[in-house]
Image (cartoon, grey):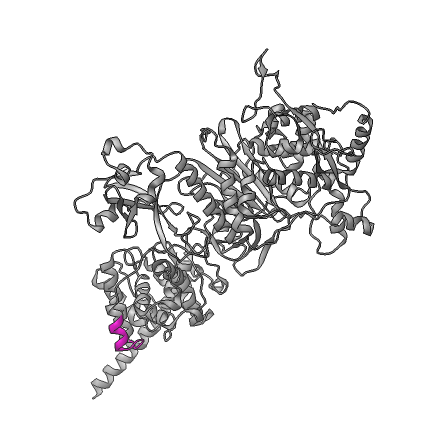
Amino acid sequence: MRILKRLTLIGLICVLGLAVLGSIAIGVTYWLVAPRVPSVASLKDVQMQVPLRILSADGKLIAEFGETRRIPVDIQNVPANLKHAVLAAEDADFYHHSGIDVTSTLRAAMEVMLHRGEKVQGGSTITQQVARNFFLSPQKTYTRKIIEIFTAFKIEQELTKDQILQLYLNKMFLGHRSYGVAAAAQYYYGKKLDQLTIAECAAIASSFQAPSVVNPIDHTGHLIARRNWVIGQMLEHRFINRAEYTQAIAAPDDAAPHEPPIQVNAPYFAEMVRQQALQRLGNQAFTDGYVIRTTLNSHLQDLANHALWSRLEDYDHRHGYRGPSAHVTLPDPATPAELAKALASRGDLSGLEPAIVTAVDARAARIYVRGGQTVTLPVGAMQWAMGYARKAATGGKGAASILQPGDIIRVREVLDTPASKAPATAAANPTAGTAKHWELEQIPAAQAAMVVLAPDDGAVQALVGGFNFQLSKFNRAVQTARQPGSSFKPFIYSAAFDRGYTPASIINDAPIALPDPSKPGGMWIPQNDDDKFRGPMRLREGLAQSVNLVAIRLLDAIGVRYTRQFVTRFGFPLDAIPANLTMALGTASVSPMAMARGYAVFANGGFLVNPYYIAEIDNRDGKAIYKADPVRACRTCEARLLDEGKTTSAPAQPDAAAGDPGALGDTANALAATTPNTPLLAPRVIDPRNDYLMTSMLQSVIYGQDGTGAAAARQLGRSDLAGKTGTSNDYHDGWFCGFNANMVATVWVGFDNFTSLGHKEFGARTALPIWMAFMGPALTGTPEDLLPMPPGIVTATIDRTTGLPAPPGDTNTMTEMFKVEDLDRLREQAKQQQNQAPAYDIF
């Protein structure tokens, strides 16, 4: 008995000694590593890396930029099944331990001893993993493990269990650039967290351990095994019942890549915003969760996309079928898997789907479309391609003269509507959902660009920089410098109106020969597009019919130097404008954006606005850190200034500071300076009467009897449109710039290598159809909006031939608009000629 008591006492002394020694060891260990244990206070306000999101004006997603996919989520918004799946997989006792699981830690220590000191994985609680992922390196050392344990204790003291779990669920890498459970759910299943099934929750939870090897997409066998183990753990810990377990185990793994749900197709625009974000915010732009709200109108962008794609394809059709994209030899018969493999490297390009021809005869071709659909392509769906010279090689007729089995082609699905090429998507066409059919297409060889601005403040409402961003990232809307052709003439006419010319002024459309500075002793003999001469013409006729020689003689009369300076009022840099008479033919170097800005002056009443596209930048907390404050056109502000006595000088006169737009509008901002919440006002750059006359002239391009834009009047059925066609030398560029008081849209068509678009491919035939296809639906349901006639404009009856006020009894008359002082001068001139033989000034 004494021996037993003595042994018991010795045992207690040993245990107490070991406890003391253990405490001393722990204390010494903590004393040694304490300086290396990080402060965990920062976890209370941790900032996760979150990608940049770019939204349209109506809140739709345009793009995301960032190396990581992450959607931060609050713990209360994480469904119970997902929390339970993660706990079952990683730390079932998470809510009961104090930061470490002693049993798991001892088991891991035993594993180390059994493996003779080799470091093994395991034993880490969720809290320890948070400590490791936020503060420590992934290097496996005993020192790091000890620091991890002490850090976990500190985390448990500073944060609640829910706060720790929230950090964990948002922080962890789960494969394929996805960080956090919300991003993983979106990428692997295209779902929000509350839409996940138990099996999907378990699959995501399975990815925490080794995401590069076990995730819902890669190594499916490993994933299923791990997922089913997690589901079993959920049952064991009573997170789910037997019926739920059985259903979850039987569920297939249907994960697939799901990129962010882009709602607006505007990649060229998105890249412009990305570059601006980088300039404004630095490299943190793509990691700090910024949200950029832009000026883009998603509806108008959809319309612009469809208009450009469809009408550029129409142009391409006129120049023939160039053959299939590729040709492969197919086994007979080819299985769906073999057909899908042949198309695997090809994707959708601006609505053009890749397809492979499986059979063909004279009446139709049988094709397999990417995605698994097999359809019949009747000969009527490829009628435009019938001129393609492949008949000699194939000996076939009808469809067989164009296509062969094994041809890889492009097709587009369109609605069965009278207006062919209606898009088969509800976003671009609200009637989507009716019967559809497929048509043979090809990727256009030419390119096009389109810019849509709000004329009152320059907001970019739609922008397309080319046919397809994947094929070419060069943004032709802003980066190109092309010759605008006759679409540049309105700026020269505006300069002439500032020098006393009127819409009724007569210019002689006759041959002209001028010295050519580029050729010593040579002559420059410009021509009209149709090589015809019409004789004396009024300026209104000359612009409407786009007569080159009228523009050249007019420019020569008012002076190249003066005109060049005047045109800078519209926002064009001086060095982009040629210092010679070729300016009249549109040989400047401009982009569609620059032309849209110039035409916005005509649309808004004479003010120069600055195009902008970022309306607001919000930080990750939703607080605005930047709001755009653009200058705005205000047609009534000058009158208000004068009425209120808030200006020291009247608006500048037409001849003031031809090269200084600010000199014509600086006084307008006096109102903004004295009135709270008044926006900055854009400078007036042309007299309102000049603007009104020019808009009237540009309406004649559309509504005039021989106007080059007359097709718009016939098709759109509105009376408030104005614009100008443009075609550069040898048909290298086609343009149409048009507007009403609420919208400016500019379209350019051409080849990147400056190849000719083809004989007679004028802007009226290449660019105008795109403009009409956009402007028609864009203005549907909107009231017609015409600029009001400003003071100082009068109408008078003139003689069509002389352009002078018509004398009594004259029957060859029409009504024309004038500045009041110009009409007075012309009336005096007409009186002087009443008793003389008919005569008038012709240049």
Q: Is residue 27 visible?
A: no
Q: Is residue 404 visible?
A: yes
Question: Residue 572 location in percent, x, y?
Answer: 62, 34
Point out residue 480 in the picture as x, y percentages from the top left corner.
Answer: 51, 35
Q: Is residue 284 left or right of residue 505?
A: left
Residue 481: percent from left, percent from top:
53, 33
Residue 390 occupies which quadrant of the picture? top left
Which stretch is magenta? 237-247
- Which of these two is toward me, 706 or 503? 706
**Residue most toward the left?**
332
User: Does residue 173 appear to the left or right of 701 in the view shown?
Assistant: left
Check residue 244 for magenta coloring: yes
- Judge whether 687 appears above or below 776 on screen: above
Q: Quadrant of residue 664?
A: top right
Taking the spot 52% from the left edge, 51% from the top edge, the residue there is 777
Residue placed furthest toward the bottom: 1
Residue 650 pos. (x, y %): 80, 42
Q: Nearer the viewer, residue 364 or 407?
A: 364
